[in-house]
Image (cartoon, rainbow, N blue to C red):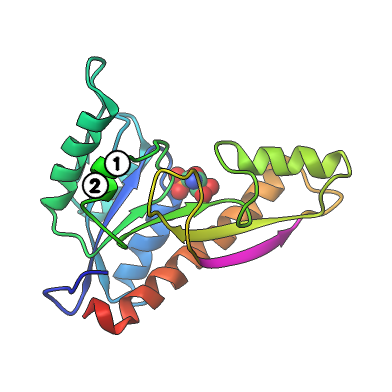
Amino acid sequence: MAPSRSARTRIVVLVSGNGSNLQAVLDACADGRLPADVVAVVSNRSGAYALERAATAGVPSVQVGKHDDESRRDYDARLADIVAGFAPDLVVLAGWMRILTSDFLGWFPDRVINLHPARPGELPGTNAIERAWHEAMAGERTVTGVMVHLVPDEGVDDGPVLATDDVPIRPDDTLETLEARIHAVEHRLLVDTIAGLCREPSTR
Ligand code: GRF
């Protein structure tokens, strides 16, 4: 990550929906587990509940939707400009449902991380928990997991792995019970990974 001007790491969180992982980061900043501040929440969707979580926490939020006549590259450049305005040390994709191009990523080298509810190299893309559960019910899988990785390029849910944890799938799991267990692991793994990045000498 780039050197920070302050002792606390400045985080911008990109979201598209519920924002339970955003909440985990906000809580960890507030109770001192993270020497960091969420300085902005950016959503591509106007109705995202994550925006309400930001408001409740007193964190500025911005909704940046893609215009119909706007190219991906132009949208990503506009998004990068807005995110850069918050001078982040770290950009966290927490349920961000768009693939970012180099027009965004080029602005934040080694500073964008993504959370994915599957093990490295497995189940890239949307509905990873549901797909893992269906595979388990078909007898094709007994374990899935969670990973946090750097986002160097447009690879989907791919990039240098920062942390990963397995989540066993129980024979009596419903999709809902599996989702709940995976989300609990995500909340812990994301906060722990950010804590490790905050401690890196290069971030100070
Ligand atoms: C998480 O499972 C995350 O791994 C995936 O999208 C989900 C977002 O959940 N990319 P939330 O919005 O943080 O509750």
Magenta span includes 164: yes
Residue at (34% x, 73% y) in the render = 31
Label pair 2/1, CB-CB below 8 angstroms:
yes
Q: Position of residue 2 (x, y in %)?
A: 21, 69
Q: Is residue 123 above or below residue 191?
A: above
Tag 1 secondary structure:
helix
Residue of label 2:
55
Residue at (24% x, 50% y) in the render = 106
Callout 1 amino acid: Leu
Q: Position of residue 59 (x, y in %)?
A: 21, 53
Residue of label 1:
51
Q: Quadrant of the N terminus?
A: bottom left
Residue at (28% x, 84% y) in the render = 201
Find the distance from the CA under tag 2 to the CA under tag 1: 6 Å
Mark 1 Cα-neighbour bin, 10 Å: few <14, some 14–19, many ≥20: many
Residue at (59% x, 58% y) in the render = 146
Callout 2 amino acid: Ala
